[in-house]
Amino acid sequence: MKAMFGMLDLRAGSVLLDGEDITTLQPQHRVQRAVWFKSTDAKCIHVEMTVEENLVVG
């Protein structure tokens, strides 16, 4: 999640959101894309849970 939102510097690789490379986007633009992506998805991310816990909950 931190890499997706630009809070973690990447050493290698890329960040994809719904197949789109967002690696070079500024953090505020990444958040805008993620909010739009999330609004089109019925699932919810629980911020108080770990990534693994969110994946289990689905």
Image: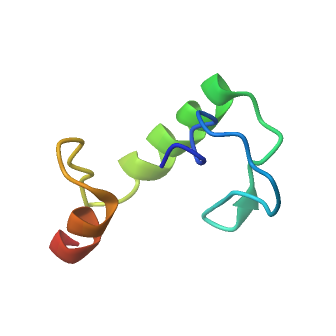
Asked whether 8 or 35 is in front, the reply is: 8
Residue ID at (74%, 28%): 26
Q: Position of residue 29 (x, y in %)?
A: 66, 29
- 12 sits to left or right of 45: right
Asked whether 11 or 26 is in front, the reply is: 11
Q: Quadrant of residue 6?
A: top right
Q: Position of residue 24 (x, y in %)?
A: 83, 41
Asked whether 42 or 11 is in front, the reply is: 11
Q: Position of residue 47 (x, y in %)?
A: 24, 42
Asked whether 41 or 29 is in front, the reply is: 29
> As drawn, which residue projects farthest toward the front?
11
Reply above or below: 54 against 9: below
Residue ID at (70%, 57%): 15
Reply above or below: 56 against 21: below
- 55 sits to left or right of 27: left
Tell me the colour scheme of the image. Answer: rainbow
Residue ID at (26%, 60%): 42
Q: How many marks?
A: 0
Q: Quadrant of residue 14?
A: bottom right
Q: Quadrant of residue 50?
A: bottom left
Quadrant showing the C terminus? bottom left
Residue ID at (25%, 61%): 43
- 41 sits to left or right of 9: left
